[in-house]
């Protein structure tokens, strides 16, 4: 017997939870709902979707449209953000100038470039990396010191160069991950942090693997110390094709290399 009107009514079980419900006295749930447990669960999910797009709370007693309509309304373009700095972005007070051998020389540059790859030791890979960005140049193991304000605006290289401050060269340090390469990178980063290098906007450090496989723990620890002193770090894996002299291109490069190029293009665009 039905407790509501003391007559027989049709009792059925919910296909979702197995609970009994009364079709004669079931409230007017929206189309597609069978019992209270189902509508409440679906209402909570649907309610969160509506609130995310500012449509207010869901009313289970009214007929509603399907949630698929909301999916297209929430679609938006991803944010184009600059790569976040993970270390100091400029010289710091109290950092001493490195003493002794190992400091890089400075070389005046009369030709503008949007980006300079500075190999901190021989064989670092600055020439290979310069091939990834057609208008970038290898600094030939010396700090580039601008002596002109760049190229005319009509030049394709001049357009990118003028995003930087006048008389400033944008530089990425390049080093191999062996012990001497990391030591050379540390000396260059310290020299920059001391303020001894003029006219340089250091974007970061590219660490190029010196061999296949993982770094030994001692080198990983050293690399962690070195990368803490530069604005950003990009890790370039061992690339056998580059060793064999095959053509270098962004499209054929590993994911980490492509990500670095994307980061640099974003930095050079501001």
Image: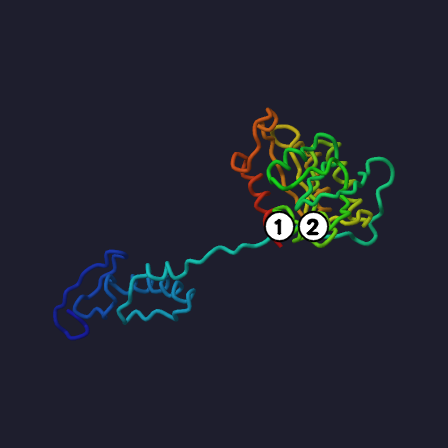
Nearer to us of marks 2 and 1 is 1
On the picture, is 251 further left or further right than 40?
A: right
Q: Which mark is residue 154?
A: 1
**For the residues marked 2 and 1, what is the alpha-carbon distance in whole angstroms?**
35 Å
Q: How dense is the environment of label 1, judged by Cα within 10 Å: few (below 14), some, or many (20 and up)?
A: few
Query: Residue, x 38% and y 69% (percent of image)?
Result: 55
Mark 2 secondary-structure assignment = loop
Q: Is residue 126 above or below residue 230?
A: above
Q: Quadrant of residue 180?
A: top right
Image x and y of residue 229, in percent: 73, 46
Is residue 43 in sight in this rendering? Answer: yes
Query: Residue, x 57% and y 54% (percent of image)?
Result: 81
Mark 1 secondary-structure assignment = loop
Query: Which residue is at the far right?
Result: 100
Pick the front one: 252 or 64: 252
Q: How dense is the environment of label 2, judged by Cα within 10 Å: few (below 14), some, or many (20 and up)?
A: some
Pick the front one: 244 or 33: 244
Is residue 222 in sight in this rendering? Answer: no
Mark 2 / mark 1, whichever is N-terminal: 2
Image x and y of residue 45, in percent: 37, 61
Q: Quadrant of the N terminus?
A: bottom left
Badge 2 is on which residue? 87
Image x and y of residue 7, in percent: 12, 72
On the picture, is 172 further left or further right than 196?
A: left
Query: Residue, x 25% and y 62% (percent of image)?
Result: 33
Q: Quadrant of residue 57?
A: bottom left
Q: Quadrant of the C terminus?
A: bottom right
Q: Is residue 238 above or below residue 18?
A: above
Image x and y of residue 155, in percent: 63, 47
């Amino acid at each position: 017997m039905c407790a509501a009107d003391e007559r027989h009514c049709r009792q059925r079980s919910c296909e979702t939870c197995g609970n009994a419900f009364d079709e004669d006295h079931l409230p007017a749930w929206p189309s597609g709902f069978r019992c209270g447990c189902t509508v409440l669960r679906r209402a909570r999910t649907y309610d969160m979707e509506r609130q995310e797009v500012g449509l207010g709370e869901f009313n289970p007693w009214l007929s509603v449209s399907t949630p698929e309509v909301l999916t297209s309304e929430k679609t938006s373009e991803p944010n184009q953000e600059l790569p976040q700095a993970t270390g100091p972005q400029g010289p710091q007070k109290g950092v001493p100038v490195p003493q002794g051998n190992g400091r890089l020389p400075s070389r005046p540059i009369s030709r503008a470039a949007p980006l300079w790859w500075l190999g901190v030791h021989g064989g670092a890979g600055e020439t290979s990396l310069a091939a990834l960005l057609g208008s970038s140049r290898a600094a030939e193991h010396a700090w580039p010191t601008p002596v002109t304000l760049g190229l005319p605006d009509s030049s394709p290289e001049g357009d990118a160069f003028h995003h930087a401050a006048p008389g400033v060269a944008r530089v990425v340090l390049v080093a191999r991950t062996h012990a001497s390469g990391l030591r050379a990178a540390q000396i260059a980063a310290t020299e920059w942090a001391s303020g001894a290098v003029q006219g340089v906007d250091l974007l970061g450090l590219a660490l190029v693997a010196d061999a296949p496989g993982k770094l030994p723990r001692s080198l990983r620890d050293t690399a962690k110390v070195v990368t803490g002193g530069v604005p950003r770090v990009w890790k370039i894996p061992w690339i056998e094709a580059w060793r064999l002299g095959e053509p270098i291109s962004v499209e054929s490069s590993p994911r980490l290399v492509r990500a670095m190029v994307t980061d640099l293009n974003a930095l050079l665009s501001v």
